[in-house]
Image (cartoon, grey):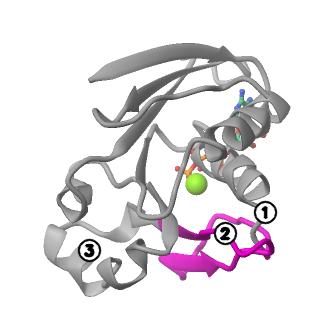
Amino acid sequence: MSQIKLQVVDPAKMIELGEALARNFQSGDLIVLDGVVGAGKTTLTKGIAKGLKVKGSVTSPTFVIARVHESQVNGPELVHVDAYRLSSVMEVDGLDLESSLDGAVTVVEWGSGLIEGLTPENWLIQIVRDSDESNDLREVTITIPQSRSLDLKA
Ligand SMILES: Nc1ncnc2c1ncn2[C@@H]1O[C@H](COP(=O)(O)OP(=O)(O)OP(=O)(O)O)[C@@H](O)[C@H]1O
Ligand SMILES: [Mg+2]
């Protein structure tokens, strides 16, 4: 299992990272986003959506737990899940993410510890923010699935 650690200085750079990551994702991929409230999980997902060229805008869903963004380019769709309100694997099962998984890149905020059973392997992206909340710097650790590699160059 290999990991890479990056410093992301502002929201625009977080979007760029998402775009670069998206080029490495393929249909069937499960991406778990880990990080406290306001870490930048949704911001990163916006970048992934941009990179995948999917329809609609990525938002922090208040009531919607999973949102499907269709591709504009005949590529994988983006399934964006906010598991914040889910507390058990059983509730995750209820979302039936398996049925959309194959044709999608599935990104799950707050999925750590809940969602990993869905696929044999997954990407894990951990975002850590400074204890000083006015600091825009984020440390991002990407854990790459065993069978895959990561190229962040444009
Ligand atoms: N380097 C950075 N990367 C990402 N976001 C940043 C950065 N610096 C500042 N921000 C700001 O931090 C906030 C991150 O919010 P975002 O909704 O992406 O977080 P989140 O992890 O999804 O939170 P939640 O757990 O509530 O869903 C945004 O207001 C964004 O502009
Ligand atoms: Mg969010």
**Distance Cα–Cα, label 2 vs label 1:** 8 Å
To which residue does mark 1 refer? 53
To which residue does mark 3 refer? 92
Q: Please determine whether, in this image, residue 126 is positioned above or below residue 61.
A: above
State which quarter of the image contains the C terminus.
top right
Name the amino acid type tagged 3: Val
Residue stretch in magenta: 55-81
Q: Nearer the viewer, mark 2 or mark 3?
A: 2
> In screen coordinates, is 94 left or right of 71?
left
41 within the magenta span: no
Crowd around label 3: few <14 · some 14–19 · many ≥20 (10 Å): some
Question: Residue 38: x percent and y percent?
Answer: 60, 41
Q: How many marks?
A: 3
- Under circle 2, the secondary element is loop
Question: Residue 136: x percent and y percent?
Answer: 73, 22
> In screen coordinates, is 115 left or right of 44?
left
Q: Quadrant of residue 8?
A: top right
75 within the magenta span: yes
To which residue does mark 2 refer? 75
**Distance Cα–Cα, label 1 vs label 3:** 26 Å
